[in-house]
């Protein structure tokens, strides 16, 4: 399975119409493509987690525009877009005693691959499992 370590940026957005559009436009103005995105809402604000192709330009854009940003190391895992792919990976991690802190994914039903964002508290051990137990 293909994977790589990436930076995920958690951005705190005002919970209002247009906030996501403004942030996405800010990033797209720098010709940066988002690989994964996940929003979690709260009463007063939303937490937007993003993984971008160009981490440096994305962070510069966000901080330059005054966004509060938290940087986290994650794995961006490429899985076959077939039933059971996520379950097999989760089973391998469970067998190694690794708990998944959070996970979110992006896939198109007609595409052969899916991107999965994975975070654990045991990143070194997780990397070994993803490599196939090396």
Image (cartoon, rainbow, N blue to C red):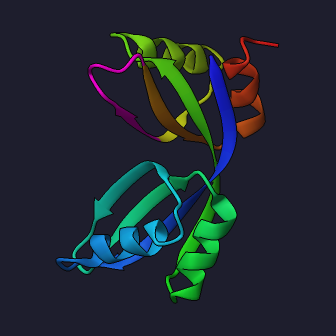
Q: Could you say which is closer to the camera, residue 95 or residue 61? A: 61
Residue 11 is left or right of residue 126, and the answer is left
Residue 28: name its quadrant: bottom left
Residue 124: name its quadrant: top right
Q: Could you say which is closer to the camera, residue 80 or residue 84? A: 80
From where the camera sits, is residue 122 visible? no
Residue 3 is left or right of residue 90, and the answer is right
86 above or below 56?
Answer: above
Q: Tell me what residue is drawn at x 82 percent, y 13 percent.
A: 134
From where the camera sits, is residue 118 visible? yes
Q: Could you say which is closer to the camera, residue 13 or residue 129? A: 13
Image coordinates of residue 48 in percent, x first then y, are 39, 63
Image coordinates of residue 4 in percent, x first then y, are 69, 35
Image coordinates of residue 13 in percent, x first then y, are 36, 77
Q: Could you say which is closer to the camera, residue 130 or residue 99? A: 130
Report the magenta residues as a range: 103-112
Q: Tell me what residue is drawn at x 65 percent, y 43 percent.
A: 121
Q: Tell me what residue is drawn at x 55 percent, y 19 percent.
A: 94
29 above or below 120?
Answer: below
Q: Is residue 104 magenta?
A: yes
């Amino acid at each position: 399975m293909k994977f790589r370590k990436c930076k995920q940026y958690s951005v705190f957005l005002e919970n209002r119409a247009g906030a996501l559009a403004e942030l996405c436009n800010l990033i797209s103005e720098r010709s940066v493509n988002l690989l994964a995105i996940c929003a979690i809402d709260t009463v007063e604000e939303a937490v937007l987690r993003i993984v971008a192709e160009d981490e440096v330009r994305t962070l510069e854009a966000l901080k330059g525009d005054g966004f509060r940003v938290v940087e986290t190391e994650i794995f961006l895992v490429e899985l076959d877009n077939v039933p059971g792919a996520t379950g097999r990976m989760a089973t391998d991690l469970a067998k190694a005693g690794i708990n998944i802190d959070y996970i979110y994914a992006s896939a198109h039903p007609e595409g052969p691959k899916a991107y999965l964002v994975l975070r654990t508290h045991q990143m070194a051990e997780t990397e070994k499992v993803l490599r196939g137990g090396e």
